[in-house]
Amino acid sequence: MVPGADFMARMSGAGFNVIGLDLPGHGESGGPRGLYTIDGLIACVSAVVDWMIENYNSNIAIMGSSLGGILCPYLAHGEKRIKAIVAHNVADLKEELPLVIPRQKLLVGLSKPVAPLLLKLNAPVVPAWAVFDITHVWENPAYHRLWRKDALCVWWYPASTIADIFLNPGPKPSLGEITTPILVVDGEYDWIFPVDYCQRQAAKFGGHRDFEVIEKAGHELPVEHTTDFARLASWWLKERLALDR
């Protein structure tokens, strides 16, 4: 949507072999729109890791932004062959959800008592705007308008997906149990994942962890601040992965 904002190409240009994985039910991946589970994602990531080891080497990191940033630490915990994580914002899905607007608190409060039932409901009944504030995703209003017209975007989620990610803490590790080295990056003006929240969660990880803030940036770091984010991520990954060679 944004000319010149190809984050994966920037990482490739920095010397990495880059594999882009759309979540099941998202982007160009198949499956019912928005339907996935963390266990299912771990299986997808493991398949990609198998392919990368066969075709490249075992010096593998995982990177994600926004929802991807939230999920990456949990996926790395489930796939032990991953050696480093770059997460653009993080969240504690077991103990401290990032509830920054009243409707998020209301949704979680009403849904928690019936979470076991919701885990079985695969109908797309939860609008994306109820889960996060879509008005604060982009700094540039023109990009927001393009995003709203993108046919690949998911605007409704099955209740089972929301329940598995946000309402089912039992099977998830605590952040302290996640020991894969991690870089957490946040935008100075990210209203969806405020710096103080992400910094607090980053301090919980059980292994090596670094926290960096990109100044004067909002939520869409890979797209609206591509150069700064790619430079920071590539520098950190080269340093951390080199320790394992």
Image (spheres, grey):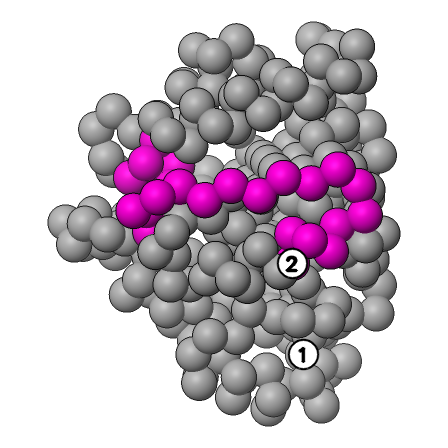
- For the residues labelled 2 and 1, the Cα–Cα distance comes to 27 Å
The image quarter containing residue 137 is bottom left
The image quarter containing residue 161 is bottom right
Circle 2 residue: 201
- Depicted 189 relative to depicted 226: above or below: below
Crowdedness near tag 1: few (<14), some (14–19) or many (≥20) residues, C-alpha within 10 Å: many
Indicate the position of residue 80 as horizontal and vertical percent values.
Answer: 84, 34
The image quarter containing residue 56 is top right
Indicate the position of residue 44 as horizontal and vertical percent values.
Answer: 70, 38
Would residue 53 be visible to someone looking at this image? no
Rendered-image quadrant of the N terminus: top left
Indicate the position of residue 25 as horizontal and vertical percent values.
Answer: 53, 50
For the record, the magenta segment spans 201-226
Q: Which residue is painted at 52% across and 21% down in the image?
A: 234
Q: Residue 118 has which mark?
A: 1
Left or right position of 102 against 175 = left
Crowdedness near tag 2: few (<14), some (14–19) or many (≥20) residues, C-alpha within 10 Å: many
Q: Secondary structure at mark 2?
A: helix
| Residues marked 2 and 1 touching at CB (< 8 Å) | no
Type of residue at label 2? Gln
Q: Which residue is painted at 18% across and 49% down in the image?
A: 140
Q: Select label 2 or label 1 by which is in front.
A: 2
Would residue 46 be visible to someone looking at this image? yes
Indicate the position of residue 165 as horizontal and vertical percent values.
Answer: 66, 64
Left or right position of 149 against 59 = left
Q: In the depicted view, which residue is nearer to us: 233 or 64?
A: 233
Q: Is residue 39 magenta?
A: no
